[in-house]
Amino acid sequence: MSVGSEGRDRALWIEIALVVAFVTFVAWPFLSPNQYLTAYDTMTYSGPNLVVTTDQIRDGTVPVWNDDLFGGVPHLANPQVAALYPTRWLLAPLEPARAFDLTIAAHLYVLAAGTFVLLWRRLRLVAPARLVGTVALVGSGTIMARSVQFEQISVIAWIPWLLVATDWAIADRRWRPRALAATAGATAMLLLSGHPQQMYIGIAVVAGWCVGRALDATRPGPTDPGGAGPRAAAIARRAVRVGAGMGLGALVAAPQLVATALLVREAELGANQSLAQASTYGYVIKPSLLAPTFLGNPFAEDLNLTAMGSEAVAFVGVAVIVAALVGLAHGFGDRTRRATVAVLGIAAVGSTLLALGPRCTDAAGELTCSASGLGFRVARAVVPGFSQTRASGRWVLVATIALALLAAFGVDALARRAVTRRSLAVAGALLGALVVVAVVAGPTADGGVDGRTVVWWATGAVVAIGAFALGALAPGRLAPAVGACVLAAVVLIEVTEQASHSMARQHLNDEP
């Protein structure tokens, strides 16, 4: 083994150790043996539903019916119950309150592992890019908010694994049974795990990912024949492979899907969600709060206040934003990842626009809509099933995933000494454009933003920009490594600080 390979192995194990330590810190409210999560949704429906599920599993029956509501209602057919999801059966012997908390903790580890494997094994990124991408996602405001709702985090946790599996199926020129099985397994887990809206969003993420990866995988080489025909055929073959894998996964999940479909057919779900309902203040991102929504605010007493609503919390931190912009700028010049980076950039912007909601108000029966909500209104009118989704702000999950992956690309380019002056200039221009957008949107003191917050943001930005400048401009081989490590440290500081007063920590109680 060469010295270089020994160093890479050591860096890998250090990254894994830091990821495990960070996820354990985030998950500690759910692992603590003497405390329990007592959030509103836990007490009102998630917890009671879990009690019904575990009681019937312990009795040796499939939890099909719930006698405790309205004289009896379908239980298995309710997808949020996830009665056929394997973890429900594995944790059924435990008391429901403890099973609830351990389910969330386990899925935080599943999410982290899937993200790390995606960055390491599929995208072939180097240290510390894999660490940055993983902690940026797991430590994001989106995951902090969703982790107190186990039926949502259970779905989100499988999205990176489905990205891994579909990328595997796309990368090869021929059928790989293991890639097919992995795609089927990840799809089945996603479909069985819980929340319908998060499934819908997750499938959208996977669809965009497959487009980008297929375009990159079929990029013509110097000796390949020209023309669109051969490339279109190659993309079609990959689409068939991915479709076959996901179709097998849907077949595995068929008992749940069929039961839910039969229930939906009998339910009163014909009416779409109104534009006014989709604009509910607490369920959308506010244009005036774009900065604290994505950058966070370590001085806010309640993380929900950074976005004025738990459905819109999405902080990733200043360093992640800077790294993502560098990853975007560098990626456009990298032929091997150009389409993937473009899809991620479009996804980040597009999902943020969707998370704004339709921006409509209903005053005395007269509906008034803002231009900033046009993207949501178009999607609602065109995309099947879009109008049935509830909280518009949940679309910010797509932006969070995209930013985490782009940030990992940026750090990878820095560590490989591939960041150019041109990439820095483009990233700087993009950063300037974002600042202009945030200012034009009309920043307010809402979200607890004050002078201390601005200083925190400015300090993080200066250090992150300095780290990239050091790696790109300073001579020698050591500068890029130092810059990458400094950037990783800033990311860890930002997300750890926000995680230290997460929603889960605010809802702990000594009694279940």
Image (cartoon, rainbow, N blue to C red):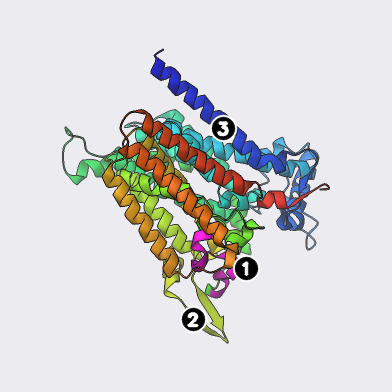
Question: Farthest residue toward the bottom?
Answer: 364
Mark 2 Cα within 10 Å, few/some/many (few <14, many 20+)?
Answer: few
Q: Residue at x 74, y 41 (%)?
A: 99
- Give the camera-side residue of 374 and 402: 402
Q: Nearer the viewer, mark 2 or mark 1?
A: 2
Given the image, on which type of amino acid does mark 2 rest?
Thr
Q: Residue at x 78, y 48 (%)?
A: 51
The boundaries of the magenta stretch are: 276-292
Mark 1 Cα within 10 Å, few/some/many (few <14, many 20+)?
Answer: few
Q: Nearer the viewer, mark 2 or mark 3?
A: 3
Residue 277 included in the magenta stretch of the image:
yes
Given the image, on which type of amino acid does mark 1 rest?
Glu
Q: Is most of the magenta stretch helix, strand or loop? A: helix
Q: Which residue is mark 1?
A: 268
Q: Residue at x 71, y 43 (%)?
A: 29
- On the image, which quarter does residue 59 sit in? top right
Decide which of tag 2 and tag 1 comes sooner along the chain.
1
Label of residue 368 in the image:
2
Q: Which residue is mark 3?
A: 18
Kind of element beneath mark 3: helix
